[in-house]
Image (cartoon, rainbow, N blue to C red):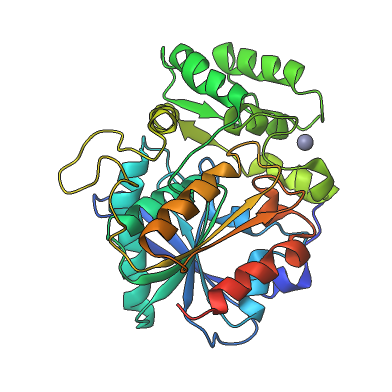
Amino acid sequence: MTTTVTAARRAQVDEHHFLKADDGVALTLIHVRGAAAPTKPPVLLVHGAGMRAESFRPPAIRSLVDALLEDGWDVWLFNWRGSTDLDAVPWTLDDVARYDHPAAVRYIVAQTGATSIKAIAHCQGSTSLSMAVVAGLVPEIDTVVSNGVSLHPVVPRFSKVKLHALRPLFQSGQPYVDVAWGDGPEKGVHLVTRSMVRLWHVECSNPACNMASFALGSGHPAIWRHRNLDRETHAWLATEFGKIPLALYAQIAKSERAGQLVAFQPTEGMPVRYASAAPQSTARFALFTGSENHAFLPQSQQATHAYLEKHQPGRHTVHVIPDYGHADVFVGHRAHLDVFPSMLEELNREA
Ligand SMILES: [Zn+2]
């Protein structure tokens, strides 16, 4: 199937920036130029685990990038170390929080001369960014729009079974779960996993959709509602997912048990529990999720909202979008009507 590319997407000009994380890992930023020069501050877009910067730009529909550019924002898409567009390296949320987000924020501030910036983050981009914010590592960020989960991972019961029971099986020799398993010539455990997943996920015939359900949540499908995706975007998503390190599953399992994000390993100068002390930041959070999120339940964002409001009452908001799941909040064909206006409103509010 040839993919339709909207006129708005065709008009965008990308500038690729290469930078290093604070521990030397190579990262990239895509600075997107629209038809008109920006009139508002920079916005950093942070993708989820096993995804990439480009995941925010489904080509066939009106994307969040289109909406941000038209509203005058200066858009920067980030490929942090978990991006499928970069060479795969092992990572934990601590690495991303400590080394990637601060480097990207400093880079954008240096390039633009902005005194403060905004961020929109999805899933594990959001957990790691929230960790960096509450640890006081990115003081330049004054507003965070986060989706799905921030500091309190609450997962469906079947995901707990997967996190706690299946994970050690994989740990026998696989450093990653790869949503793209079975797309290449590899055999063995990769093909067996994918074949089993396809038997279990009979809701559609898109192997990546089935694997994403297996790797990232519980449900048929798990991370979007089919009714929220148009055919082209459902097909396009097949190439938007890749490797997810097992260390991440271990960290989420540990955090889920602790009731809040915890460090993978204690590191000097970094919190062990990320929501025990008051946030070392005045950034305002607008926490989004879908009412039908089967990757992280809506209680995840509600718990983070309660934590933030306990320390900074009246400052933060939570938006539960009816009839949306996890990633369709960004890639749904009606997200530009149902979701993006609320996100823009939050960005446009006084920080
Ligand atoms: Zn599907």
In depth, the one of 268 and 244 nearer the eye is: 268
In depth, the one of 126 and 17 nearer the eye is: 126
Please state the total of marks drawn on the protein image.
Answer: 0
Which residue corresponds to the image point at 24% horizontal and 45% vertical from the top-left? 271
Which residue corresponds to the image point at 60% horizontal and 44% vertical from the top-left? 298
Q: From this viewpoint, which residue is outermost toward the left?
A: 268
Q: Is residue 36 left or right of residue 172?
A: right
Q: Is residue 339 left or right of residue 141?
A: right
Q: Quadrant of ligand 1?
A: top right
Q: Is residue 169 left or right of residue 36?
A: left
Which residue corresponds to the image point at 53% horizontal and 49% vertical from the top-left? 301
Residue 63 percent across, percent down from the top left? 69, 64
Residue 305 percent across, percent down from the top left? 49, 55
Corner quadrant of residue 199: top right
Q: Considering the image in quadrants, where does the C terminus appear?
A: bottom left
Which residue corresponds to the image point at 35% horizontal and 66% vertical from the top-left? 105
Q: Is residue 160 left or right of residue 248?
A: right
Corner quadrant of residue 53: bottom right
Residue 72 percent across, percent down from the top left? 59, 83
Residue 202 percent across, percent down from the top left? 81, 23
Corner quadrant of residue 111: bottom left
One can see residue 307 in this view:
yes
One can see residue 48 in this view:
no
Considering only vertical position in the picture, is 146 above or below 291? below
Considering only vertical position in the picture, is 142 above or below 90? below
In depth, the one of 295 and 4 nearer the eye is: 295
